[in-house]
Image (cartoon, helix red, strand yellow):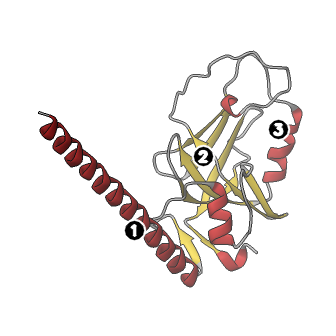
Amino acid sequence: MEYEFEKANETETSAKRIEVIQSFSQDIIEKVNYKQKISEIKNIGKITIYNDIVFNHSVDILNDLFDYNLGGYQKAVKIINSLKQIWFPKLNKQNKKYKQNPAKLGQVRAACWSNILSSDGMTITQEWIATDFFPPKRTKRKANEWKIADIGVFSKLIKGDYQFSGIFHYDQENSHDYTTVYKRESKELLFNEWK
C-alpha cells in the first residue's frame, strides 16, 4: 500500500513538473514573439490598428515603442509635446452603472468616468457618470488643452491588455460640460512624428 502511494506521488510530482516546464516554455515563446512584433513595427516606422500586438502595461508602450526608459506606474496621459499626447483609457461597456462611494467634493476618481469606444472604433465618448458630485473645474480645463492635440490612443478593455486604437481628435460639436467626444482621424501612428 505504501509503495502504491509513493508511486502515485512520484507520478503526480512529475506531471506538475512537466506542467511548470510547459508553462515556462510558453512564457518564453510569448516574450520572443512580442519582441519580434515590436522589432517589425519599429522597422516599418508605424503602428496601425491592424497590428496583432497587445501590451500588458502603458509603460511597455512608452518604453518599447517610443524609446522611453520609464519604470513603474504611468498616468493615463503622456504628453509628448504641446500638439501630441498618448492616452491610455480603460474602456467600459456601455451603460455601466456607477456605484456611489463617499467622496470629497472635487476629488476626481477614475470610477466616475465612463470611456466608451463605439462599435466601429471611430468614436470615444467620455462621460461623467457620478451623480453624487460634479467634476472639478480642472477637468474641463484639461479637456480644453486636448482640443488642439493629436491623441494617440492605446485603449484597454476592462481586465484586458492595451491595444492601439488610432489617433483621435477632440470633437467640439458633440462635446459638452460632462461629456467629451473624440473622433478617430487616423488608423496609424508614425513614430517619426511623435518625438
* Spatial separation of the CA atoms under disc 2 and disc 3: 17 Å
Between circles 2 and 3, the one closer to the viewer is: 3
Residue toward you, 81 or 118: 81
| Vertical arrangement, residue 109 with respect to residue 51, above or below | above
Q: Which residue is mark 1?
A: 29
Q: Are marks 2 and 3 in contact (CB under 8 Å)?
A: no
Classify mark 2: helix, strand or loop: strand
Q: Which badge, 1 or 2, comes first in the chain's sequence?
A: 1
**From this viewpoint, which residue is outermost toward the front?**
2
Q: Which residue is mark 3?
A: 139
Horizontal side, residue 194 vs residue 157: left or right: right
| Vertical arrangement, residue 72 with respect to residue 2, above or below | below
- Image location (x, y in percent) of residue 45: 59, 81
Q: Which residue is mark 2?
A: 124
* Spatial separation of the CA atoms under disc 1 and disc 2: 34 Å
Between circles 1 and 2, the one closer to the viewer is: 1
Q: Which badge, 2 or 3, comes first in the chain's sequence?
A: 2
User: Crowdedness of circle 1 by 10 Å Cα count: few (<14), some, many (20+)?
Assistant: few
Between circles 1 and 3, the one closer to the viewer is: 1
* Among the 4 quarters of the image, the one containing residue 68: bottom right
- Going 31% across and 54% down the picture, which residue do you hit? 17
- Going 54% across and 27% down the picture, which residue do you hit? 96
- Going 50% across and 52% down the picture, which residue do you hit? 121
Residue toward you, 68 or 94: 68
Horizontal side, residue 108 vs residue 121: left or right: right
